[in-house]
Image (cartoon, helix red, strand yellow):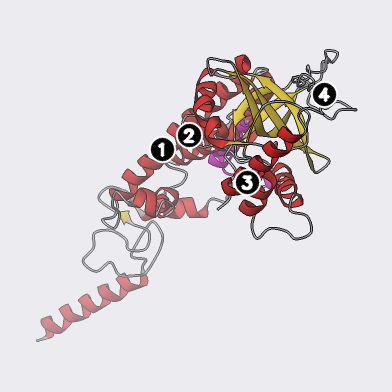
């Protein structure tokens, strides 16, 4: 028994001595290691003679990070790259706007820049989609269109790693917007030239046509535009027949007493104006009559347009100056619209038609005295006037 008690006292004394000493010679902690072979406080591994894992992190945490001295240092490096590239894309658009002098060059620049920008955006967007799909099963192929911003979240969380995907998409989108908003060399109206879609005439011309039609009925007025147009054009076919018979009787009774009629005046020659350097003006006109050669070919078409909010005779365009397809179409269409009286007051002699066809013409302006267009030229056909 004395030996056992002595051994117990020795073990207790050794245990107390161990507790009085640090358990780790590296950090000096008294925390027991338990079953671990390294210090739980600092990660010191005696067999290797160095700290593992936590020592590096502690060293990093103890390092004092430098504080930014101005606002520019707050912008990360990837932000500078993104911003400089965006400014470069905008500068490219501005340069294209001032470099191209011809409208054709502007259009080509716009289409090329927009195509390149769209390809850049699609590539960056698709790579961001692949990155999102590889990290979550919540995305599908429709997420590219349905939830475009959501698929960018995994890529943004990893910034600055993989920031080039965002750079590519933003630069491409800037090029597309700059192509149309800054360069602006693409005429959207040209998209509809081959689709058969025609623009409508301007409000001034339509209002003048309606006022001219309603003024023919006087104070009584007409129930609708169709009645007003028919009244101004000579009424219905029955009224035209009765009026023609009455006129024939009156003409037969007075034929002996009347002198021989003078030769009917022909369309007045177009006023000659001095050539000007100013650009030609475009006007919307109404087709009110035409003259044809014996073989049925259109020789000239007579125009009316709005001048000071009144519909006036504005001149004519030779049939030879019309596009071939338009001339052939009108040779079939105009005889179906014939009426006996002109829709506007004029002394010209022609085959008059109902006010249906509108067109856009270019000219050198209006004459001061006769209020006619100077050297009108055909530009395009507009939508026909609808009376429904």
In space, the residues marked 4 and 1 are separated at their CA atoms by: 84 Å
Which residue is under mark 1?
122
In space, the residues marked 4 and 3 are separated at their CA atoms by: 26 Å
Numbered disc 1: secondary structure = helix
In space, the residues marked 1 and 3 are separated at their CA atoms by: 73 Å
Mark 4 or 3, nearer chain start: 3
Crowdedness of circle 4 by 10 Å Cα count: few (<14), some, many (20+)? few
Q: Which mark is residue 166?
A: none
Image marks 1 and 3: residues in contact by CB distance under 8 Å: no
Crowdedness of circle 2 by 10 Å Cα count: few (<14), some, many (20+)? few
Which residue is under mark 3?
242
Q: Nearer the viewer, mark 4 or mark 3?
A: 4
In space, the residues marked 4 and 2 are separated at their CA atoms by: 53 Å
Question: Viewer-proximal residue, 137 or 240?
Answer: 240
Mark 2 or 3, nearer chain start: 2
Which residue is under mark 4?
259
Identify the image quadrant of residue 245: top right
- Magenta-drawn segment: 70-92
Is 185 in the magenta? no
Which residue is under mark 2?
196
In space, the residues marked 2 and 1 are separated at their CA atoms by: 33 Å
Q: Nearer the viewer, mark 2 or mark 3?
A: 3
In space, the residues marked 2 and 3 are separated at their CA atoms by: 42 Å
Q: Nearer the viewer, mark 1 or mark 3?
A: 3
Image marks 4 and 3: residues in contact by CB distance under 8 Å: no
Please report the residue visible at 16 percent of the width from the left and 78 percent of the height from the top: 7
Image marks 2 and 1: residues in contact by CB distance under 8 Å: no
- Where residue 68 appears, as percent x and y from the top left, is 66, 48
Please report the residue visible at 69 percent of the width from the left and 35 percent of the height from the top: 284
Numbered disc 4: secondary structure = loop
Is 89 in the magenta? yes
């Amino acid at each position: 028994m004395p030996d056992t008690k002595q051994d117990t006292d020795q073990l207790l004394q050794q245990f107390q001595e161990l507790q009085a000493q640090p358990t780790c010679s590296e950090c000096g902690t008294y925390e027991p290691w338990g079953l671990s072979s390294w210090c739980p406080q600092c990660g010191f591994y005696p067999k290797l003679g160095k700290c593992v894992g936590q020592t590096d992190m502690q060293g990093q945490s103890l390092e004092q990070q430098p504080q930014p001295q101005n606002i520019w240092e707050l912008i990360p490096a990837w932000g500078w790259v993104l911003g400089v590239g965006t400014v470069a894309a905008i500068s490219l658009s501005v340069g294209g706007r001032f470099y191209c002098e011809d409208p054709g060059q502007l259009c080509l620049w716009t289409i090329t820049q927009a195509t390149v920008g769209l390809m850049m955006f699609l590539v960056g967007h698709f790579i961001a989609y692949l990155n999102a799909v590889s990290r979550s099963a919540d995305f599908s192929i429709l997420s590219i269109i349905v939830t475009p911003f959501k698929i960018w979240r995994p890529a943004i969380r990893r910034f600055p790693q993989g920031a080039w995907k965002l750079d590519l998409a933003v630069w491409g989108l800037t090029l597309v917007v700059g192509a149309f908003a800054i360069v602006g060399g693409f005429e959207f109206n040209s998209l509809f030239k081959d689709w058969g879609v025609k623009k409508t005439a301007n409000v001034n011309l339509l209002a003048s046509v309606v006022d001219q039609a309603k003024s023919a009925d006087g104070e009584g007025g007409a129930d609708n535009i169709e009645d007003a147009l028919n009244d101004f054009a000579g009424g219905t076919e029955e009224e035209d027949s009765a009026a023609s018979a009455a006129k024939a009787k009156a003409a037969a009774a007075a034929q002996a007493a009347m002198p021989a009629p003078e030769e009917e005046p022909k369309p007045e020659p177009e006023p000659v104006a001095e050539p000007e350097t100013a650009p030609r003006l475009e006007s919307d006109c109404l087709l009110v009559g035409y003259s044809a050669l014996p073989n049925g070919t259109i020789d000239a078409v007579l125009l009316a347009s709005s001048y000071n909010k009144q519909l006036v005779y504005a001149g004519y365009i030779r049939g030879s100056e019309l596009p071939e397809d338009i001339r052939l179409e009108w040779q079939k269409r105009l005889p179906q619209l014939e009426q006996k009286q002109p829709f506007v007051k004029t002394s010209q002699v022609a085959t008059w038609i109902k006010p249906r066809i509108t067109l856009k013409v270019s000219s050198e302006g209006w004459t001061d005295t006769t209020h006619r267009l100077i050297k009108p030229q055909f530009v395009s056909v507009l939508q026909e006037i609808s009376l429904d």
